[in-house]
Image (cartoon, rainbow, N blue to C red):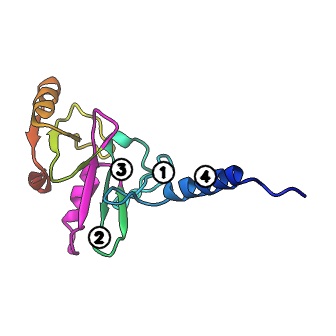
Amino acid sequence: MRRPGPSRRLGVVLAAVGALAGCSASPGGPPPIRYGESACAECRMIINEARYAAAALTEAGDAARFDSIECLARSLRQERPPPAQMWVHDYEQDRWLAAAEAFYVVSPALRTPMGQGIVAVATASDAARLAGQVHGRVVRFAQLRGV
C-alpha cells in the first residue's frame, strides 16, 4: 500500500483546519450563525436572514445569536450582566458591525422579523439616506432600549 505524499497530507491538514475554523467564532468577531437552523436566544425563532441578525458574547465566552436587533435590545433589558461584545449585521452590505458603532434606522416601512422595523448600517450618511427613503428616524445603540 502506498502512503500519501507530503503535498497530499498537507492538503488534508489544511482542509481539516479550514473545517474547524468554520465551526467557531472568529477571534474578535461574532459567533457563527447557521441561517435557517440557529434559533434566536430571545424569541426562539429560527434566524433566517443575515441582514437583520445580531450576536453577542459574554465575558465567559458564551454566545447568543438573535434574529433581529429588536431581540438583542430586549435581551439587554433583562437583569443579567450585559454582554462583553455585541454585533449587528449591516442591512445593506454583507458584513458585521460593532453594535455601539453602528447607526440604526427605525421605520414601520422596514419589515423586520419582530416587526419593530429596526435595521443597522455603518455610517451616518447611509442611515440618513435610508431613513429618508423609508420615512424613518436615525438612532444610536444607546437609544434602542427605549424603542
- Report which residue position mark 4 lands on: 15
- Report which residue position mark 1 lands on: 34
Using residue 61 as the reference point, say whether residue 12 is left or right of it. Answer: right
- Report which residue position mark 3 lands on: 67
Q: Position of residue 125 (x, y in %)?
A: 10, 31
Amino acid type, mark 2 = Thr
Q: Nearer the viewer, residue 108 or 24?
A: 24
Residue at (23, 67) in percent of width and height = 84
Using residue 58 as the reference point, say whether residue 82 is left or right of it. Answer: left
Amino acid type, mark 1 = Arg
Query: Which dot, 3 or 2, sits closer to the camera?
Result: 2
Amino acid type, mark 3 = Asp
Q: Is residue 122 inside the magenta stretch?
A: no
- SS label for mark 4: helix
Q: Position of residue 83 (x, y in %)?
A: 24, 67
- SS label for mark 1: loop
- SS label for mark 3: loop
Query: Which dot, 4 or 1, sits closer to the camera?
Result: 4
Report the Cα–Cα distance between label 3 and label 2: 18 Å
Amino acid type, mark 4 = Ala
Instruction: Determine whether label 4 and label 1 are within 8 Å by CB.
Output: no
For mark 1, does the 10 Å Cα neighbourhood hold few (<14), some (14 to 19), or many (20 or more) residues? some
